[in-house]
Amino acid sequence: MKQLYIAFFGLILMLQSCKTDEDPVQRIDQTMNIYIRDNAGKDLLHPTNTGSYVSFTLNDALGEKDVNPVPYSLQVANDSVFYINYIAGARRVLIAENGDSQTYRSIIALALQKKLTPTTSSTVNDTMEIQYRFTPEVFEVSKVFYNKQLRFTKMPDQPNVVTIIK
């Protein structure tokens, strides 16, 4: 009889472990590719070109300290155009809530070192506000403002490509 109970509880345990998880999976879409160009379309992130930004820093303006570097990587697309790949790292603050939907924002201060001549440069200070939409189904970038101007609005199933014209 004892073996029958052990077999029964073993069967129950096995069936319990095989059940499927009915909870939906939340899709996360927060990676952004940020291109900076001039009015003529020239890549301003190419580090060797005069007139381009040769170095830059991204700092979390909502961070708990004065200096909160935000991680990013400088990438090169197939067409040799440089872009900033930003995944995450800046603090997100809740700004709106409506039922299951919440809107968060991050603010990033950018310090862009512009190469004016082979020996001189100047610093340009800009800000970027990223708004995120959070629902049980998705966490995604929804809007990006650059110097308080809307530069990106999320389109369904499209990559988060932000182009800044300076």
Image (cartoon, rainbow, N blue to C red):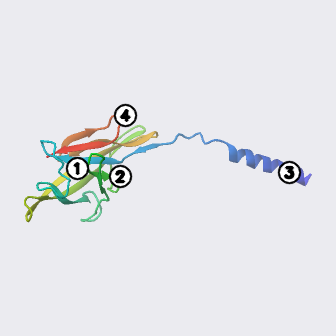
Number of other residues with Cα within 10 Å of mark 1, as a class: few under 14, some 14 to 19, many 20 or more: many
Q: Which residue reaches farthest front?
A: 79
Residue type beneath disc 4: Pro
Residue 149, located in which quarter of the rendered image? top left
In the image, 96: left or right of 166? right
Of callouts 2 and 3, the N-terminal one? 3
The residue at which mark 2 appears reads as: 87
Q: Are marks 1 and 4 in contact (CB under 8 Å)?
A: no
Q: Residue at x 86, y 51 (%)?
A: 5
User: Marks 1 and 4, how far apart in space?
Assistant: 22 Å
The residue at which mark 1 appears reads as: 128
In the image, 142: left or right of 44? right
Q: Nearer the viewer, residue 7 or 2?
A: 7
Q: Are marks 2 and 1 in contact (CB under 8 Å)?
A: no
User: Marks 4 and 2, how far apart in space?
Assistant: 18 Å
Q: Are marks 4 and 2 in contact (CB under 8 Å)?
A: no
Q: Residue at x 56, y 41 (%)?
A: 23
153 over 79 or under it: above or below: above
126 over 162 or under it: above or below: below
